Image (cartoon, rainbow, N blue to C red):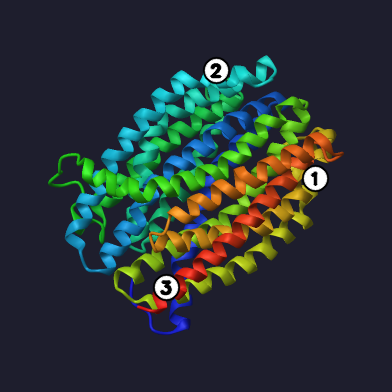
Amino acid sequence: MQETNTLKEKLKLFSIILIPILITQVSMYLMNFFDTVMSGRVSAQDLAGVAIGSSLWVPVFTGVNGIMLAITPIIGQLIGANKNKEVPKKVQQGIYLAITIAIFIFLAGALALKPILNFMDLEDSVRHIAAFYLITLITGIIPLFIFNTLRSFIDAMGQTRISMMIILITLPLNVLFNYIFIFGKFGVPALGGIGSGVATSVTYWVSCIIALAVIHKINPFRRFHVFSNWVKPSLKAWLEQLKIGIPIGLAIFFETSIFSAVTLFMSVYNTNTIAAHQAAMNFATLLYMIPLSVGMALTIAIAFEIGAKRYKDARTYGYIGISGGIFIAVFAGLILYLFSGSVASLYNSNPNVIALTKQFIYFAIFYQLADAFGAPIQGALRGYKDVNVTLIVALVSYWGIGLPTGWLLANFTALEPFGYWVGLITGLTCGAVALIIRLLSLHKKYRTR
């Protein structure tokens, strides 16, 4: 990261930070994308099983990952304030906390997985695939959380290209592992959708090992000596990270879990409807990586400027994010509209599933329009370490407005399963408006300083 003086310099620096993050986020999500698509080539049951498993795993992962994301503004503000000596201790405590949380999630999953799946009205084969997909995937949870902590440290320094290179190395490996374990190649038995869980777990281990090597051997990370002079775990340091990370994580959890809740409610429909809904949601979420990446870049840039007490520059980056959100909303909507048929055929060859998927995709266009505004603004607020309001907005807009609206429309109108998508659109729109108001209020507050 470096100080910039003109709008042109800011746009250039922001692009340098953003593009690698975008490639990284898309590549990371492509792992889930390939899990779903390649499993769907086995059968509709495998597609539905992996979809259900993913719908349970993604909100847990993204919510908990919010705690690791807190490292980015913490380190960013320290670097902006030239307090580099404090950085290694923060990263070490982040690693301790990541391991502790991973163990807790592992134990909680062991207790809760079977009751949750039994509660859902699923075919036995779909339930079996979902269960063992999650069981195999969770064996990689510790290296995954460590990797995300290290990645937050890497990104906070503005070295987002390093994260990009790590993911670009591991993505093709994930596809190869999927090919081996799903379809049974090179003497390995064909595991179907369960094999995608094995492949993803192995990929998590590879990503973590590469990140550890990079930070230990390559500058500018090497000069911080993150893995030397280890300090003892500190509850005080954990609480500092949790104070920022828990609101971030809960806000992300409320947003992502509503999609899982919708999938659970839609389990009353047939397997084709579940598969079509999840296929449309899967691709829409892939497009969501664009505004999410803008938000992550804003967190890095704004945290650096706030640490250096350059509040006007931080405000300028905020406006860049809002403008980017407008462009992204239009771009994502066009992609979904123009390629709805092609996207639907990627997931399944069943004509009924394809037709249903296209209908869901048309609703996803409007869902993207709202989400493309909200995600960049959330990232900007994280740069200010302003996370509590985002948490409240997420809870009210998604669970207080979106889900009830969707349930009413699905059960008492002719929209049926599509009613849930209208509810999602309503909740996301309300949330985006509230977040814009909050960011503009923060800009006004810091202008007085």
Who is closer to the viewer here, 174 or 448? 448
Labels 1 & 3 near each other (Cβ < 8 A): no
Q: Quadrant of residue 448?
A: bottom left
Tell me if residue 350 comes above or below residue 338 in the rendering. Answer: above
Mark 1 Cα-neighbour bin, 10 Å: few <14, some 14–19, many ≥20 = many
Labels 3 & 2 near each other (Cβ < 8 A): no
**Dot 1 corresponds to which residue?**
358
Furthest residue in direction top, as rendered = 124
Who is closer to the viewer here, 49 or 166? 49
Tell me if residue 105 comes above or below residue 90 in the rendering. Answer: above
* Element under disc 1: helix
* Element under disc 2: helix
Q: Quadrant of residue 190?
A: top right
Tell me if residue 350 comes above or below residue 432 in the rendering. Answer: above
Q: Earlier in the sequence, mark 3 or mark 2?
A: 2
Q: Earlier in the sequence, mark 1 or mark 2?
A: 2
Let me know if residue 185 appears in the view.
no
User: Where in the figure is residue 105, as x and y percent of width and height?
Assistant: 41, 29
**Dot 3 corresponds to which residue?**
445
Q: Earlier in the sequence, mark 1 or mark 3?
A: 1
What's the distance in space between the residues labelled 1 and 2, CA to CA? 33 Å
